[in-house]
């Protein structure tokens, strides 16, 4: 009976050794896998730093472009205001020309009879002068 106990202890010890060996192999494989994951994460971190740098540069350029567009827009607003002023001036000038034309037309209509009489008198005087010369 005692031999059985020794055999059982020996089997338990062998099983424990086998378990420890497989555990060691598994831990070694896990260590290798974790090292690979670590290297992959380091590479990923470097790539993320590069992306962050490029994103920062892109944002800076975008802000500069937005500022440039705002400045040019402000300059164009001044140009449009100037063009509006020129349009208003031309409108006022056209209105003045219309008033002047209307005034001339009215004056001409009012003095038409006087001009007609003056032309008749002038013609009559010229006829008399020509008759006297002959």
Image (spheres, grey):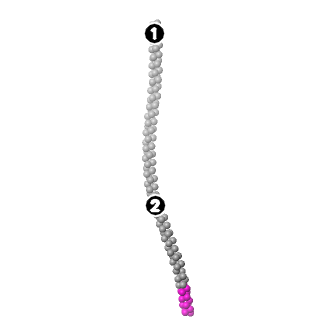
Residue 53 percent coordinates (x, y): 43, 42
**Tag 2 residue:** 81
Between residues 123 and 28, which one lies in front from this camera angle? 123
Gap between marks 2 and 1, in whole Å? 109 Å
Between residues 102 and 132, which one lies in front from this camera angle? 102
Residue at 45 percent of width and 43 percent of height: 55
The reply to whether dot 2 and dot 1 touch (C-beta < 8 Å) is no
Mark 2 surroundings within 10 Å by alpha-carbon count, few (fewer than 14), some (14 through 19), many (20 or more): few
Residue 49 percent coordinates (x, y): 43, 39
Is residue 124 part of the magenta span, yes or no?
yes
Residue 130 lies in quadrant? bottom right
Residue at 46 percent of width and 31 percent of height: 37
Residue at 49 percent of width and 67 percent of height: 91
Query: Mark 2 or mark 1, which is nearer to you?
Result: 2
Residue stretch rendered in magenta on the structure: 119-134
Residue at 47 percent of width and 66 percent of height: 89
Residue 68 percent coordinates (x, y): 44, 52
Between residues 17 and 124, which one lies in front from this camera angle? 124
For the stretch drawn in magenta, what is the main secondary structure?
A: helix
**Tag 1 residue:** 5
Is residue 84 part of the magenta span, yes or no?
no
Which quarter of the figure is the C terminus placed in? bottom right
Q: Earlier in the sequence, mark 2 or mark 1?
A: 1
**At numbered mark 2, what does the secondary structure look like: helix, strand or loop?**
helix
**At numbered mark 1, what does the secondary structure look like: helix, strand or loop?**
helix
Between residues 70 and 16, which one lies in front from this camera angle? 70
Mark 1 surroundings within 10 Å by alpha-carbon count, few (fewer than 14), some (14 through 19), many (20 or more): few
Is 28 drawn above or below residue 11 in the view shown? below
Residue 74 percent coordinates (x, y): 44, 56
Residue at the far top: name it: 1
Residue 51 lies in quadrant? top left
């Amino acid at each position: 009976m005692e031999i059985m106990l020794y055999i059982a202890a020996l089997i338990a010890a062998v099983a424990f050794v086998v378990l420890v060996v497989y555990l060691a192999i598994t831990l070694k494989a896990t260590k290798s896998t974790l090292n690979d994951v670590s290297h992959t994460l380091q590479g990923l971190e470097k790539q993320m730093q590069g992306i962050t740098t490029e994103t920062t540069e892109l944002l800076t350029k975008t802000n500069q472009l937005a500022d440039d567009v705002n400045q040019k827009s402000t300059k164009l607003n001044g140009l449009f205001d100037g063009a509006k002023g020129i349009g208003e001036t031309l409108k006022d000038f056209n209105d003045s020309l219309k008033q002047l034309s209307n005034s001339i037309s009215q004056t001409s209509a009012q003095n038409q009879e006087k001009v007609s009489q003056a032309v008749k008198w002038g013609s009559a005087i010229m006829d008399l002068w020509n008759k006297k010369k002959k």
